[in-house]
Image (cartoon, rainbow, N blue to C red):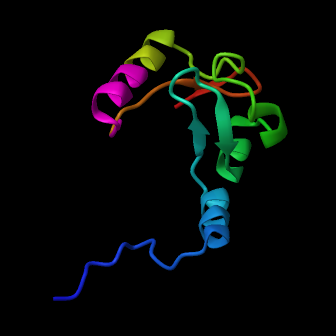
Amino acid sequence: MPEKLSPLQGLKIEEFTQNLYSCPYAILITRLSDGLILYVNRGFEEIFGYPSSEAVGKNTLDLRLWVNDADRQQVIAWLSATGEVQSKKFQFRKYSGVGGN
């Protein structure tokens, strides 16, 4: 019986990184424990107005991304409990200070 193949099997890390970076949606990878931003893609840069050089290495609190801190706390609780957050809307603050979701 043939083994199931992962959809990512055979994908080179460079290809994966390029696809992630060029995705039009805002993607940021943060550390759950302290919100440290480890990676942002071009979609994040364009939507939020932060160049990656100003976002990576800071945390979401430093950038004041969350309009409502209660939302941030709820997301942390969901991620800690279930490992995911789906189909939720939150308000975020852009570099210009203007909010969006």
Q: For residue 22, which quarter of the picture? A: bottom right
Residue at the farthest bottom position: 1
Which residue is located at x 29 percent, y 27 percent?
Answer: 81
The magenta segment is: 75-86
Q: Nearer the viewer, residue 52 or 90?
A: 52
Dominant SS type (magenta)? helix
- Residue 2 coordinates in the image, percent (x, y): 22, 88
Does residue 82 lie above or below 2 as drawn?
A: above
Above or below 30: residue 69: above
Snapshot quadrant of residue 14: bottom right
Taking the image as drawn, is residue 47 in sight?
A: no
Regarding residue 55, the answer to whether it shows in the image is yes
For the image shown, how many numbered marks are present on the structure?
0
Q: Residue 78: within the magenta?
A: yes
Q: Position of residue 19 (x, y in %)?
A: 61, 66
| Residue 46 image position (x, y, % from top left) | 72, 45
| Residue 57 image-quadrant placement | top right
Q: Residue furthest right?
A: 53
Residue drawn where x is 59% and y is 24% of the image: 35
Assign the N terminus to one quadrant of the image: bottom left
Residue 98 magenta = no
Residue at horizontal 75%, vertical 27%?
A: 95
Q: Position of residue 36 (x, y in %)?
A: 64, 27
Asked if residue 2 lies left or right of residue 92, the reply is left
Q: Which residue is drawn at the image coordinates 25% and 81% (left, top)?
A: 3
Please give left or right for residue 43 compared with residue 66 in the image. Answer: right
